[in-house]
Image (tube, rainbow, N blue to C red):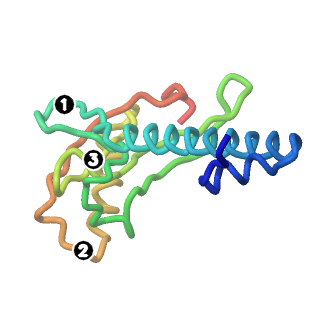
C-alpha cells in the first residue's frame, strides 16, 4: 500500500485518539455557533423588516407611533413628551397620562397627540401649548389628535 500524499490524512493518521475527539468536538462547537449566529441574524433581520402596525384614526390619517427604521425622526430632541401623574387606583398605583405627543412614524412629517378622555379640551389645549413652546417650525407637520381612556376613573384624576 502506497502512502497517502495528502497532508490532512497524514496529520490525522499521526494523532492520538484523544486529540481526534478534541478536534471533532471543536468542529461541532464551531458549527453550532455558526448556526446560532445565522439564526439570530435571520430573526433580527425579519423583525426589522416588519412594518409598524398603522391604525387609521377618525381624521383619515394613517397613524403609528411604533419604531420604524425607515422613518426619518426629526423631532427626537422634543418628542415624545407627556404630562402624567401617579395616582392611587383601587388600592394600587398607576400612571395617568393626561396627554402624550409622539412622532407619527407612518408618514413623513406627522405628530400624534393623544389625550385622556376625561377632559379632552383641557388636555388638548395643554398639549398644544407644549407644541407652541417648541423652538421649531411645525407648520409642515400633520398633527393628528386621538383620545384614550386612562387606567383611572375620571373622578380620581
Check if mark 2's residue and mark 3's residue have beta carbons within 8 Å: no
SS type, badge 3: strand
Q: Earlier in the sequence, mark 1 or mark 3?
A: 1
Q: Secondary structure at mark 1?
A: strand
Q: Is residue 33 above or below residue 130?
A: above
According to the picture, the residue beneath numbered tag 1 turns out to be: 56
Q: Which of the two marks, 1 or 2, is nearer to us in this view?
A: 1
The CA span between labels 1 and 2 is 27 Å
Residue hosting label 2: 136
Residue 12: image location, x then y, percent:
74, 47
Residue drawn 81% across the image and 39% down it: 21
Residue 15 is left or right of residue 53, and the answer is: right
Which one is in front, 75 or 39?
39
Residue at image coords 29%, 52%: 125
Could you tell me if the residues under marks 1 and 3 are in contact, i.e. CB atoms within 8 Å? no
Which residue is identified by label 3?
A: 112
Residue drawn at point x = 29 percent, y = 62 percent: 73
Q: Looking at the rendering, which quadrant does residue 29 occupy?
A: top right
Residue 121: percent from the left, percent from the top?
29, 42
Q: Earlier in the sequence, mark 1 or mark 2?
A: 1
User: Farthest front residue?
Assistant: 1
- Neighbour class for label 3 at 10 Å: few (<14), some, many (≥20)? many
State left or right for residue 129 relative to residue 110: right
Note whether 133 is above or below 84 in the view shown: below
Amino acid at each position: 500500500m502506497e502512502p497517502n500524499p495528502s497532508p490532512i490524512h497524514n496529520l490525522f493518521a499521526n494523532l492520538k485518539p484523544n486529540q481526534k475527539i478534541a478536534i471533532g468536538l471543536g468542529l461541532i462547537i464551531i458549527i453550532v455557533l455558526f448556526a446560532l449566529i445565522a439564526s439570530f441574524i435571520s430573526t433580527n433581520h425579519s423583525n426589522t423588516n416588519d412594518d409598524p402596525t398603522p391604525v387609521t384614526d377618525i381624521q383619515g390619517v394613517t397613524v403609528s407611533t411604533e419604531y420604524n427604521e425607515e422613518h426619518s425622526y426629526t423631532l427626537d430632541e422634543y418628542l415624545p413628551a407627556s404630562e402624567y401623574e401617579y395616582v392611587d387606583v383601587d388600592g394600587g398605583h398607576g400612571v395617568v397620562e393626561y396627554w402624550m405627543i409622539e412622532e407619527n412614524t407612518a408618514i413623513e412629517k406627522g405628530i400624534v397627540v393623544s389625550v385622556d378622555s376625561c377632559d379632552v379640551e383641557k388636555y388638548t389645549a395643554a398639549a398644544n401649548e407644549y407644541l407652541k413652546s417648541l423652538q421649531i417650525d411645525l407648520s409642515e407637520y400633520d398633527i393628528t389628535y386621538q383620545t384614550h381612556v386612562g387606567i383611572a376613573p375620571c373622578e380620581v384624576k
